[in-house]
Image (cartoon, rainbow, N blue to C red):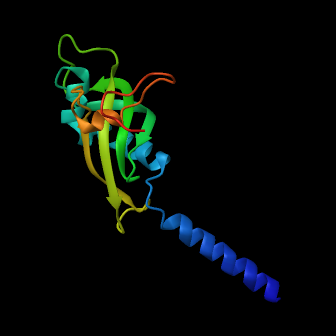
Amino acid sequence: MPRMHLYGALTVTAAALVACSDKVPTDVVQSMLRIGLAGHASGVASQLCGVKVHGIADANVTRIVLAKDGKSGTAHVSGAPTSTTPLPAGAPATCEGDVRFAFKRSKVTASGWSAVYVKLASEDPEDKDACLRYREPGESPPPGCER
């Protein structure tokens, strides 16, 4: 019987350690970006598409790179634009680009995380967040980025 208590205590301790992790899980980043870009972040979706749209349907969120803090980073997003009215002339079939994001711990969400911001990633090489952007294997980081 004492062994059962030990296993129970170890299980509870392991679960608590995982729950208290200060690194936002990749699945949470993917889920929240998909939901946000579907309609809540129409400004970011419009910037990704280059025309005014309502959102991005079924956004594909890949190449997630977390910053050292484990709560912010960049991700590559692609998907079809949506609109509550007909799409404007010149709207692309697929919108894609890199976005910056940040999350914080939250007691009111099921995942335990909530988004602080989602922004279009800057192309400015002087931007410190350019160091977080995904790079292909073997590709050199921008000047001034330590890794």
Picture coordinates of residue 78, whole percent (x, y):
38, 26
Query: Hey, which quadrant is residue 105 in on the image?
Result: bottom left
Q: Is residue 88 left or right of residue 98?
A: left
Judge whether 24 appears above or below 94 on screen.
below
Picture coordinates of residue 56, whole percent (x, y):
32, 30
Q: Residue furthest top?
A: 90
Q: Is residue 89 left or right of residue 144?
A: left
Q: Residue at x 48, y 63 (%)?
A: 21
Q: In this rendering, does residue 64 appear at all?
A: yes
Tally the marks. 0
Q: In this rendering, does residue 83 appear at all?
A: no
Q: Residue furthest bottom?
A: 2
Query: Hey, which quadrant is residue 38 in on the image?
Result: top left
Front-lying residue, 66 or 85: 66
Judge whether 114 appears above or below 96 on screen.
below
Quarter placement of the N terminus: bottom right
Q: Residue at x 35, y 67 (%)?
A: 108
Quarter placement of the C terminus: top left
Front-lying residue, 139 or 2: 139
Q: Residue at x 20, y 20 (%)?
A: 50
Judge whether 120 appears above or below 5 on screen.
above
Front-lying residue, 93 or 145: 145
Query: Hey, which quadrant is residue 135 in on the image?
Result: top left
Q: Is residue 125 left or right of residue 23?
A: left
Judge whether 139 appears above or below 119 on screen.
above
Q: Residue at x 41, y 30 (%)?
A: 134
Picture coordinates of residue 99, whole percent (x, y):
30, 34
Picture coordinates of residue 144, whole percent (x, y):
30, 33
